[in-house]
Image: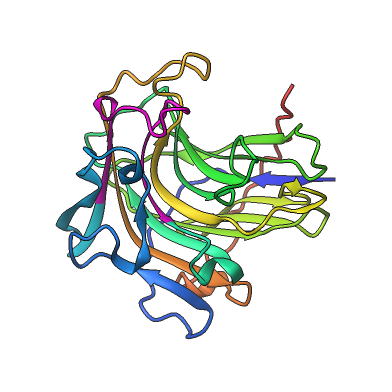
Amino acid sequence: MRIIIATIISFTLLSFMASPPPGDIIYDVSWTSGTISQGGLVNTASLCISTNTTAATIVDSFNAGQNWLRIETKLTDGPCPTTLKANRSEVSIFSANAAMTTGEYFYNEQMYPLWQLKDPTPEITWQYHHPDGLSKTGPPPVDLWVQNGSYYIGGAHDENGTNTPVERLVKIGDVVPGQVEKWLLYYHRSLSSDGVIRVWRNSVLVFEELGPNANKVSGAIEPTGYYKTGIYKWVNGSTTAGVPSKQGSRVIYIRNIKVGTAAAVPEDFYPAILPPPVVDPVKIPIRVKP
């Protein structure tokens, strides 16, 4: 049995807590230079598109005097990889990083520029990705999906290992260009009832799913994956996945990527957790793939 609760409300911005308790936050990086690899990150797009350098552009003092990583995808970049025919420019924390062996919390701040238009073609701006080298394909176990100016929690899992994944796509609110969005994901992987996915937006819990949420591979839960953030438009260039974007460029700003252990709590990432909204949550059933 799986339970999903999604709540759509208005949001209040909170200042970021600069000094979380030591030990619970095992990965923490912001940008002080134009080096994409700062903090051990890898630019996924650069691995297969040698001409894509826009992801390394730093915007100084764009918001509150802090640096942001400017990430851009262009239709002219070409597919990455060529077999998937997707546009992407993402920074990844690979499973070789020790943080990924124990990390269950993933935090990052994002902001779309004021000029960014709505796009009917979906994109993913952060996700927990399958381990590299695994034969498993399809959607990641959990991701933040943006389409037509709205945010969704997407992803899929196959706890039975039958290659018939259960997919989700739950709307949790609207994009506000120019607004800093402070996202926190708690992902406790499991093939059984103790699995947990929770997502906070600006310290407000907007999504909760309880139950199986991982993939079974060779009779066991798949190995540990890793977190990615940026822009991933898998539809662009494809003839089967939908209509490619008509926008020549997509831009998003990223900063303050953090990973926390299972011992962390949301208050480690936010100075305060807002009380639950005084509204009934919207319970939306999972969309099961035909």
Image: 231 above or below 59 = above
* Left or right of 268, for residue 262: right
| Residue 9, percent from left and from top | 52, 46
| Residue 54, percent from left and from top | 21, 43
Q: Nearer the viewer, residue 224 or 20?
A: 224
Q: Nearer the viewer, residue 169 or 188?
A: 188
Which residue is pictured at 48% across the width and 76% down the height?
Answer: 26
Q: Nearer the viewer, residue 61 or 160?
A: 160
Residue 64 seen in the current view = no
- Quarter containing the N terminus: top right
Image: 235 above or below 226 = above
Is 97 within the magenta? no
| Residue 269, percent from left and from top | 47, 70
Q: How is the image coloured?
A: rainbow
Which residue is pictured at 45% across the width and 30% down the height?
Answer: 234
Which residue is pictured at 51% across the width and 61% down the height?
Answer: 106
Image: 127 above or below 29 = above
Q: How many numbered callouts?
A: 0
Stretch of the chain drawn in magenta:
70-92
Residue 260 seen in the current view = yes
* Left or right of 93, for residue 263: right
* Left or right of 44, for residue 213: right
| Residue 148, percent from left and from top | 42, 27
Image: 246 above or below 8 = above
Q: Nearer the viewer, residue 285 or 100?
A: 100
The answer to which image quadrant residue 69 occupies is bottom left
The answer to which image quadrant residue 52 occupies is top left
